[in-house]
Image (cartoon, rainbow, N blue to C red):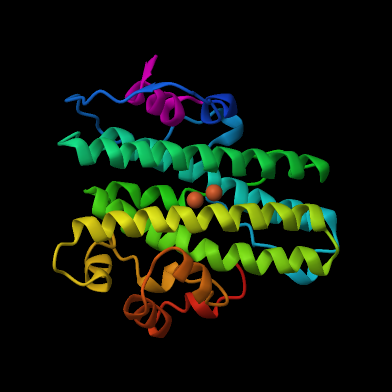
Amino acid sequence: MMHYREYARILLEGASLEDKLIHLKDIDYTESTTQYLLPENPGRSKQLKFDNQQVKFPKNTSFHLEEKRGLALHFFANHELLAIEMMAAALLIYPDENKDSILFKKGLVKTIQDEQKHLKLYLVRMKDFGIELGEFPLNDFFWRSMEKCSTPSHFYSAMAMTFESANLDFAQYYEKSFINVEDFETAKIMRIVYEDEISHVALGAHWLNHWRGDVQLWKYFVDHLPGVMTPARSKGIHFDRNSRIRAGLDDAFLDQLELFRDEFKVTNRKSW
Ligand SMILES: [Fe+2]
Ligand SMILES: [Fe+2]
């Protein structure tokens, strides 16, 4: 049986897509005292190397073209790959202090397996459109926030409560966009991602609620956002309150989030 840390190292340090998609049934969750320093970058084959050349997200008004839909999926696939690597990093960098740490890590492994499923769905569909992962630049935007996530609270404030929370809005928005061009197969993938994402946000919310003590969830979340990240990033194009209620977030929190505005006009942006 492989130890969870060994598993995480393959996911994070392995260079190939096979490494990122490795699946294990039986995992050993014995507490470990091994320390791990976050690497500058995840292991990436030449094909998958970070490249921050700007590529514009395609407008959904161009989604009647397969190549544009393929490019949109390439963006989504990149996010899934980054999620796998960041969650693997979280398995490694945070210490095993008690039983909660192990429960936290078990939850992460389960989430990683969903992200792998999403990545595979996108890869297969992209292939239908003649596109391989790495054919377009793969940016490292999400990964760069990792070095600022000094505790699991920071990690879930960024990952579940920001990136995955925004994805609730985006997955729903793009599901509709694909339906509009009668691409029901891709729309179905967006629906699967949306449903899974609700459980991922729920898991993050569960842990923040567990760790926050008497502090209000909104305050705890905002205080633990790493670096210059703002709560505006946790919203997409249209605010989907219902999925967040399903994720267990209460009205007090959602009112704050929905009303939140700052100079970072993310909720006014036109695309992902
Ligand atoms: Fe995902
Ligand atoms: Fe997710």
In reply to whether residue 4 is colored magenta, the answer given is yes
Which quadrant: the C terminus?
bottom right
Magenta span = 1-15
Choose between 6 and 216: the one closer to the eye.
216
State the residue in front, 136 or 216.
216
Residue at the image point whose x is 25% and y is 32% from the top: 37
Quadrant occupied by the N terminus: top left
Residue drawn at point x = 20 percent, y = 28 percent: 35
Tell me if 201 is positioned left or right of 171 in this view.
Answer: left
- From the top left corner, tell me how far across and down residue 192 is, in percent: 64, 52
Q: Position of residue 18 (x, y in %)?
A: 58, 25
Question: Relative to residue 238, is residue 53 depicted above or below?
Answer: above
32 is higher (above) or lower (below) than 199: above
The image quarter containing residue 230 is bottom left
Q: Is residue 52 magenta?
A: no
Q: Is residue 186 left or right of residue 225?
A: right
Q: Residue at x 32, y 35 (%)?
A: 91
Which is nearer the eye, 172 or 126?
172
Q: Percent from the top left, x then y, of residue 69?
A: 76, 56
Up-down: is 4 above or below 244?
Answer: above
- Asked whether residue 60 is in view, the answer is yes
